[in-house]
Image (cartoon, coloured by chain):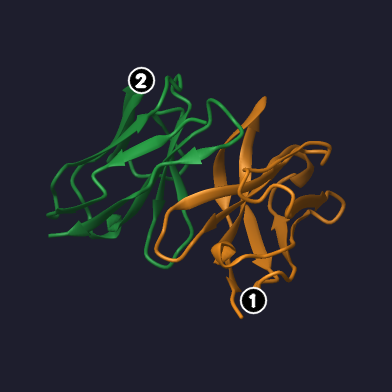
Amino acid sequence: DIQMTQSPASLSASLGETVTIECRASEDIYNGLAWYQQKPGKSPQLLIYNANSLHTGVPSRFSGSGSGTQYSLKINSLQSEDVASYFCQQYYDYPPWTFGGGTKLELK
Amino acid sequence: EVQLVESGGGLVQPGRSLKLSCAASGFTFSNYYMAWVRQAPKKGLEWVATISTSGSRTYYPDSVKGRFTISRDNAKSSLYLQMNSLKSEDTATYYCARQNTMGTPDYFDYWGQGVMVTVSS
């Protein structure tokens, strides 16, 4: 099974700041990676797929990059509505489809 | 608009059974793989089950294999999860999710609001 490791587990940032969250796979996943946002008390929502493609309706301040085993999610100009937990997920090799442990983003 | 609405959650004793349902609308249900993903309280996401478009193929992680059964009724645009021999570690919010199916099932592009399952005596 492919293991997904996210970092950091939590972070605190100021409004307008740029934030980067990392996700590392235990082996090459050939850009088979998605990012999800989960706001408090809500269900997860797809942000990014294929490592760098923005899902319908997602603001352009969100972007994804990476290759091989290393991927990242960047949020430019942090907004208050971006306070949430973020999860990565690999779908290159399945089953199982596996998620990272999550990153909790709070406002400083 | 894609909508997924789960039902059937609740409090159940260890060793007992529970069946979850998910009503889908806003898309051609029979064209998509469907899945269940769960989240234990204050924990991360765990994939629980996936079913192919026709229902002929199902996939489970080792943690639920042999205890959970995913099924679907394409005529009713409905997805189900039969959970048997429930354990305390099955306590979680269960989400119904559509899997993007461009050739192979991959990411989860739409999610329901979730239903809570609590396994406790």
Please, what is the three-letter code of the amino acid marked with disc 2? Ser
Task: Give the vertical position of B70 relative to A95 (above or below).
Answer: below
Give the left or right position of residue B115, taking residue A17 as reference. Answer: right
The quarter holding residue A22 reads top left
Label 2, secondary structure: give it. Answer: strand
Label 1, secondary structure: give it. Answer: strand
Residue B10 is tagged as 1
Q: Which residue position is annotated with label 2?
A: A67
Please, what is the three-letter code of the amino acid marked with disc 1? Gly
Name the chain letter of the residue that bears numbered label 2: A
Depth order, front residue of A87/A77: A87
> Residue B6 placed where, x, y %?
66, 64
Q: Of discs 2 and 1, which sits in the foreground?
A: 1
Q: Residue at x 52, y 49 (%)?
A: B46
Depth order, front residue of B30/A66: A66
Depth order, front residue of B16/B106: B16
Judging from the image, what is the letter of the chain drawn in orange?
B
Give the left or right position of residue B7, taking residue B46 as reference. Answer: right
Depth order, front residue of A70/A16: A70
Question: Could you tell me how many numbered marks the image carries?
Answer: 2
Q: Residue at x 32, y 24 (%)?
A: A66
Q: Residue at x 39, y 46 (%)?
A: A87
Residue B114 visible in this rendered orientation of the protein:
no
Task: Give the vertical position of B68 relative to B42 (above or below).
Answer: above
- Looking at the picture, do discs 2 and 1 lie on one chain? no
Judging from the image, what is the letter of the chain drawn in green?
A
Q: Residue at x 14, y 55 (%)?
A: A15
- Dot 2 alpha-carbon crowd within 10 angstroms: few under 14, some 14 to 19, many 20 or more: some
Cα–Cα span, label 2 and label 1: 42 Å
